[in-house]
Amino acid sequence: MAYDFKREYRDLYVPKTTPALIDVPAMTFVAVAGTGDPNAAGGAYQEALGLLYAFSYTAKMLKMGPWQPEGYFDYVVPPLEGLWWAGSGAFDGLHIAKKDALSWVSLIRQPDFVTPEVFERVCDMVAQKKPEFGPALVSDELRLVRFAEGPCAQVMHKGPYDEEPATIAKLAAYIEAAGLAPDIASGGESPEGHVATAAFDGGALLAALDAGGAVPTVRLHHEIYLGDPRRTKPENLKTVIRHPVRPAVD
């Protein structure tokens, strides 16, 4: 049976609808950073997903080829994840009012055998099989990053993505009651100091996240998508919402 990260790490991927604290360990991801409306057809977000899945399934299917890296094992590709923040005007206090002001890092977890050397080799394989991704790979839009989120609070949101604010409010109340505070970059600017537009420096953000397994200086609102919106009714979608936390300052 293929190794399933969701089954083996239920505390990370299947939390309850009641908020709880968790210490998130170091993990390896492939990641793309960008900005803009995630629903825009043919936009940067959709292109990023195509690149992430192309890499992830090429790595998984190494079992079918003549070469497997040291430590390879068969596994289920983990779910898509996203780190999010917003530029000025993105929120009206309750809902996302301007989705093209959103900035994001999209990620998919990788097994630890995906080292920098394996990453480069799999990227070459992707470029050969799917030449349309060649320019993005040459320009290093896809990065291998490794970091720990450390102390966090998380909760399962069930339902449409646009109804997340109520669940986030419940998570925020739990964090405050626990004597903690969100440790999240906030305001109208990205953590690297760039307004959330196409001009922001995604490479700098990915470099900041790649903390070698430590907790990075940049900590963000985090979502893990357990349902496929193309095949799942909105009311049945499940999304893990995770916020980094720190001790509250009196």
Image: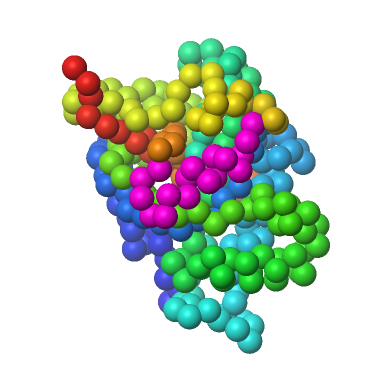
Task: Report the side of 41 relative to 217 (left or right).
Answer: right
Q: In this view, does 140 lie above or below 196?
A: below
Query: Which picture quadrant has residue 175?
Result: top left
Residue 72, image x, y percentages? 48, 78
72 with respect to 97 (left or right)? left
Q: In which quarter of the image is the N terminus?
A: bottom left
Does 204 appear in magenta?
yes
Residues shaded magenta: 200-216
191 left or right of 155?
right
**Residue pictured at 63% horizontal, 36% vertical:** 201
User: Does 222 appear in magenta?
Assistant: no
Question: In the depicted view, which residue is nearer to us: 45 or 157?
Answer: 45
Which residue occupies 60% across, 74% down?
61
* Residue 117, x across and y down, in percent: 56, 70
Residue farthest along the right direction in this orientation = 131
Q: Is residue 131 left or right of residue 1?
A: right
Question: Residue 102's x, y, as percent?
Answer: 60, 28
Q: Which of 212 and 42 is in front in this view?
A: 212
Q: Where is residue 109 in the image (x, y as percent from the top left)?
A: 48, 57
Quadrant in the picture for the C terminus: top left
